[in-house]
Each structure stands twice: as structure tokens, then as C-alpha cells.
Amino acid sequence: MGATGEQERNVIKYYEKTAEEYDKEYEVLIFKKLYDKITWRYIEPYLPVSGVVLDAGGGTGKWTIPIVEKGLKVVLYDISREMLNVARRKIVEKNLENMVVFKEGDICEIDFPDDSFDFVLAEGDPISYCSNPDKAVGELARVLKPECFMAAGVDSLFSIVRGMLVRKGPRRPSKSLGR
């Protein structure tokens, strides 16, 4: 992994602390389940019939598992070692480990050659959490083979501002962020 800035270090710290409980946080949110179903509906038709998928910022393997179950190989790439450890346990439990390569790294500096992947997925907003989103998108595009597809999710600045207005001001950072 290349040199990381303060923002990346804070992201790593947060996910290292929350990795074990991360999936549980989303299991109870009905809107998140609906979001996931809709997201899968749009991702699935663009997956290649065969090849290798990059799950960039893939965390605990939420998207890696259904992609592997479709018969595709996946490189699960995440900045957090603990998130990758959780993903590895889940994937081993399902006996899918021979289809997945786990790689720790920063999406702003992807250490794969140009044109390496048949599909690139960056769902769960990893682009939103890096200090240089333009560089991250450039890296994701660089490792994508020509004529292949990329799907990415990003946090909307509008939703952050709207949330601040509803709360009448900026939210104070949680103790788990950066501490």
C-alpha cells in the first residue's frame, strides 16, 4: 500500500474497529436491504459470463459472495485488513475461498496492471471515503479491461447537507472515528 493521508488513516482506523460488527449494523435496516436488492438488480446483468471481478472496497465480502456464487473469480480489495479477515471467514464458511483473492490496498493506488479485470465493482461508497476521488476513479478505470463495465456507488453531498439541516447543524464526530 502506498503512502496514505490522514483521511485514509482515519478510514482504516474506523473499519479496523468496526469490522466484526459491520454487517450486523446493516442487517436491521430495512431501507438497506431494499437498496441492496435494487443494487444487485442493476449489477447482475452487467456481470461477465466468465472472468475476474475486482470488488474494490469490498469490505466484508457482501458483494463478493453472490458474484462468486455466479461462478466468477473475485479479487476482494480493501484498505482494512480486519474487514478482509471478516470477509475471509465468511467466504471460507461457504467453501468459496478457491474463487477469491484477498488483497489489502488503497483504491487510489491499485497494484494491478492495466486492463486486469472483466468487471469492476466499487459499491459501498469507497470512492467517497478516499482523499482523491478522481484518482480512485482513474485507477478503477485503468484496471478495467476495454469494453467492460464498472459499477460504483458514492455518497451524495446533498444527503450529507440535508442531514445537517434536519439536525440543525453539523453532527459531532463519533468517538469511534479517529480516536
Image (cartoon, rainbow, N blue to C red):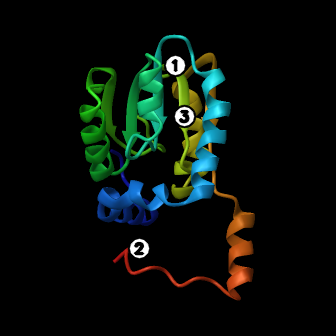
Label 1, residues with CA under 10 Å away: few <14, some 14-19, many ≥20:
some
Q: Is residue 149 above or below residue 140?
A: above
Dot 2 lies on which element?
loop
Cα–Cα span, label 3 and label 1: 14 Å
Cα–Cα span, label 2 and label 1: 35 Å
Residue 123 in view here: yes
User: Who is closer to the viewer here, 169 or 89?
Assistant: 89
Sequence-first tag of 3 and 1: 1
Image quadrant of residue 147? top right
Dot 1 lies on which element?
loop
Numbered disc in front, either 3 or 1: 3
Residue on which disc 3 sits:
121
Q: Is residue 44 above or below residue 58?
A: above
Q: Is residue 49 above or below residue 78?
A: above
Mark 3 and 2 residues: CB-CB less than 8 Å, in contact?
A: no
Residue on which disc 1 sits:
115
User: Who is closer to the viewer here, 135 or 71?
Assistant: 71
